[in-house]
Image (cartoon, grey):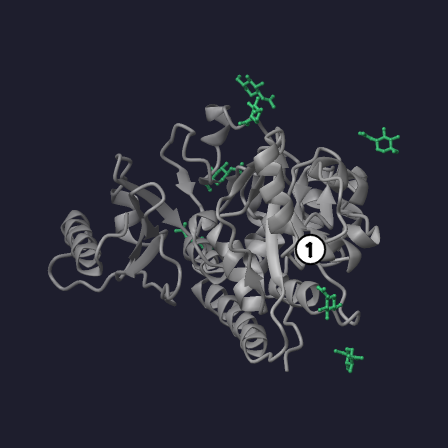
């Protein structure tokens, strides 16, 4: 997927030349509109942004497309429109947009102060009190994501699902493709570019990154023993350990050791598998249970034990030492889990949680994780919990460090 930087630059240059001649401003005329600020992608691997005088180019590895973002007051914008399999154009700043809420982390919009130009969502399963409030107040409309006529009414539609047949105003937003928590968070620069608020995006990412790296640095200098952590989920009779790179990176950055099992899946109906699963779990100090449930409130220690199917649990220190967690502490309507929203744009908060999970002080209230071994229940998010002015950007939460 990764194309070399020189190739990307060449392509951007080619596009730039094409646009230059298209707009007819060949004889040294000064373009009317200039790009104000710039974002440089430092960590994320799946998009790049290049800047011209009156336009920007986002190269998106997720859908293999280049998005030309044309400044609304430039001549290019009025003369040029692209909608091919490789190039799409958008006039920026976008005046309104809609998102496929199933996978789109709206917290990025809140940090950028863009939530009031969000005009359409595809479901109300959103783990954001303020988006729910705007929806209930009628400022955001809900529609079916297969209603293409409706989708066309927005300047842009952001989605993460590359299975959906694309239209000219679709842009693919996929922080989930990245391998590390910070790479995911850097996608704020992608959204910032569509709104001409690169400065804000840069500022948020810089403070998130600084906070994250500070916590990770402290964890790396810890001299205490490193607990072994397993992220695991149960489905249709099979337990599996996560292979998600960003989750493993979280454990590493929090100062833990990743469980190094021989294999990742264990069929509990198979006695040999069950025996091996039992043995490997005896080496684990912290478990994060990711099992999907339609009813998080009812997912308790006894649900976990039922799914485990292991009779003799005497060697499980994560149970005797009450270190059994889930990341569904904040949830709306039993479905929308804030781990997939807020924690994507603010990984420093998730990392601070994990440090507490691994090295409990009892002096830090986690945001995303609840300890089911201690009977902690989820918090149900609702519109009444929106306690800020939605016309103003939300600031990232910087965790005390050092
Ligand atoms: C360009 O966008 C800005 C900011 O939304 C707006 O104030 C301005 O009227 C737009 N200009 C044109 C020519 O559409
Ligand atoms: C959306 O529309 C499709 C096709 O018209 C339909 O099959 C589906 O049930 C609709 N979804 C919802 C949530 O209404
Ligand atoms: C979005 O903005 C466009 C262009 O300004 C406008 O034509 C359209 O009506 C707006 N759509 C919504 C849903 O607000
Ligand atoms: C698990 O093992 C049982 C018994 O061997 C088998 O019937 C079942 O299909 C297996 N399940 C999976 C998901 O492989
Ligand atoms: C139990 O948890 C404490 C921290 O709360 C930790 O220091 C200790 O090593 C853990 N014991 C085991 C066996 O995991
Ligand atoms: C949740 O648990 C309660 C009490 O055990 C039970 O009454 C209720 O039916 C459960 N809900 C679901 C959806 O299973
Ligand atoms: C608890 O946290 C506060 C604020 O971070 C700090 O001032 C205090 O020293 C901590 N107490 C303990 C016992 O760690």
Q: Position of residue 345 (x, y in %)?
A: 55, 57
Pointer 1 residue Cβ closer than 8 Å to ligand 7: no
Please name whichever residue, 167 or 365, is drawn nearer the observer in this view of the structure. 365
| Residue 394 visible somewhere in the drawing | no
Give the residue at x 70% y 47%: 328
Residue 120 picture quarter: top right
Asked which secondary structure carries label 1, the reply is loop
Q: 224 or 367: which is nearer to us?
A: 224
Q: Where is residue 369, by image quadrant?
A: bottom right
Indicate which quadrant contains ligand 2: top right
> Around disc 1, counting alpha carbons within 10 Å, would you say few (fewer than 14), some (14 to 19), or many (20 or more)?
many
Residue topped by disc 1: 368
Placement of 39 over or under 149, stated as above or below: below
Say which of 272 and 318 sits in front. Answer: 272
169 to 14, vertically: above or below: above
Is residue 272 visible in the rendered image? The answer is yes
Near-viewer residue (38 or 234):
234
Q: Residue 40 at x, y = what percent?
A: 36, 66
Q: Is residue 90 above or below residue 17?
A: above
Figure disc tally:
1
Taking the image as shown, residue 370 lies to the left or right of residue 276, namely right
Q: Position of residue 339 (x, y in %)?
A: 63, 50
Q: Work out which quarter of the rendered image holds the C terminus and state it.
A: bottom right
Residue at 46% x, 68% y: name it. 202
User: Measured from the top left, where is residue 166 in percent x and y?
Assistant: 38, 31
Identify the residue at the far left of this view.
Answer: 27
Q: Is residue 224 shown above or below 142?
A: below
């Amino acid at each position: 997927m990764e194309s070399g930087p020189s190739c990307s630059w060449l392509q951007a240059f080619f596009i730039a030349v094409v646009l230059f001649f298209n707009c007819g401003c060949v004889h040294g005329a000064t373009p009317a509109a200039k790009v104000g600020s710039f974002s440089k992608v430092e960590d994320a691997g799946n998009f790049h942004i290049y800047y011209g005088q009156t336009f920007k180019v986002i190269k998106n590895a997720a859908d293999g497309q280049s998005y030309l973002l044309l400044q609304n007051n430039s001549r290019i914008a009025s003369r040029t429109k692209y909608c091919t399999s490789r190039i799409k154009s958008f006039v920026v700043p976008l005046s309104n947009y809609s998102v496929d809420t199933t996978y789109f982390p709206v917290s990025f919009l809140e940090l950028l102060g863009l939530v009031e130009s969000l005009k359409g969502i595809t479901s109300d399963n959103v783990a954001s009190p303020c988006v729910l409030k705007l929806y209930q107040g009628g400022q955001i409309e809900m529609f079916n994501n297969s209603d293409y006529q409706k989708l066309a009414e927005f300047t842009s539609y952001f989605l993460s699902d590359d299975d959906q047949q694309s239209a000219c105003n679709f842009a693919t937003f996929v922080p989930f493709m990245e391998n590390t928590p910070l790479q995911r968070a850097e996608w704020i620069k992608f959204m910032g570019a569509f709104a001409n608020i690169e400065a804000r995006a840069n500022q948020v990412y810089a403070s998130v990154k600084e906070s994250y790296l500070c916590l990770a640095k402290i964890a790396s200098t810890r001299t205490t023993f490193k607990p072994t952590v397993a992220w695991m989920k149960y489905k249709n009779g099979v337990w599996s350990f996560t292979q998600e790179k960003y989750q493993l990176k979280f454990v590493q950055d929090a100062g833990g050791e990743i469980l190094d099992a021989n294999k990742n899946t264990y069929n509990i109906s198979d006695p040999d598998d069950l025996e091996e699963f039992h043995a490997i779990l005896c080496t684990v100090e912290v478990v994060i249970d990711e099992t999907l449930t339609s009813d998080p409130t009812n997912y308790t220690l006894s649900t976990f034990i039922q799914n485990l199917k292991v009779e003799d649990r005497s060697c499980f220190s994560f149970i005797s030492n009450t270190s059994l967690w889930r990341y569904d502490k904040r949830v709306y309507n039993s479905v929308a889990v804030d781990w997939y929203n807020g924690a994507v744009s603010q990984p420093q908060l998730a990392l601070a949680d994990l440090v507490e999970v691994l090295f409990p002080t009892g002096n830090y209230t986690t945001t995303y994780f609840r300890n089911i071994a201690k009977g902690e229940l989820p918090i149900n998010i609702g519109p009444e919990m929106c306690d800020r002015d939605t016309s103003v950007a939300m600031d990232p939460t910087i965790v005390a460090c050092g």
